[in-house]
Amino acid sequence: MTAGIFEGIEFDRETLQEAAGDEMLAATEIADLLVRRGVPFREAHGIVGDLVRQCVAEGRNLSDLTREEIASRSDELDDEYYEVLKQGSWLESKRSEGGTSSASLKAQIELASARVTEIS
């Protein structure tokens, strides 16, 4: 009976991929980069917030900011900033239970499938 809920589900993969490619989703990853480099979280949050506000105001992506622009916000931001923004890298970084990495998603799908089978 419950398995019927999932019958006919279709996903618009193009739309999902486009949504997952929104660099603003990676803002927390930039903050995490700063924290790993010794910047206190509160300060890292403020730095990233300033970068995001600038991009929103100017209609730009985070990756459009120049090296000079990011360096002016923090000495701890360098070329790794752009690596973090590469599409999908932030999705794969979330490896905990319920995270967005491919391995985490596979585990979640397997668990959900097993539970649906149990109650069917």
Image (tube, rainbow, N blue to C red):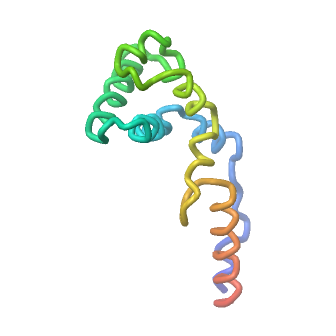
- Corner quadrant of residue 14: top right
- Picture coordinates of residue 83 (x, y %)? 60, 29
Q: Residue furthest front?
A: 38
Q: Is residue 103 above or below residue 82?
A: below
- Indicate the quadrant where residue 96 lies: bottom right
Height in image: 54 above or below 119?
A: above
On the image, the x and y values in percent for residue 106 come to 70, 64
Give coordinates of residue 7: x percent, y percent: 72, 71
The structure residue drawn at horizontal position 68% and vertical position 60%, both measured from the top left corner, is 103
Residue found 63% across the figure and 34% down from its top: 87
Q: Relative to 112, say whether 119 is above or below.
A: below
Q: Nearer the viewer, residue 44 or 63?
A: 44
Left or right, 35 with respect to 107, comes to: left
Q: Nearer the viewer, residue 99 or 13?
A: 99
Q: Is residue 70 left or right of residue 89?
A: left
Side of 116 relative to 31 (left or right): right
Check the image and report above or below for 42 versus 6: above
Quadrant of the drawing holding the N terminus: bottom right
Numbered marks: total: 0
Rendered-image quadrant of the C terminus? bottom right
Front one among 8 and 111: 111
Name the image quarter holding residue 75: top left
The structure residue drawn at horizontal position 70% and vertical position 77%, both measured from the top left corner, is 113
Q: Residue at x 29, y 39 (%)?
A: 40
Question: Residue 107, position in %: x, y?
Answer: 67, 68
> Observer-nearest residue: 54 or 5?
54
Name of the residue lying farthest toward the bottom = 119
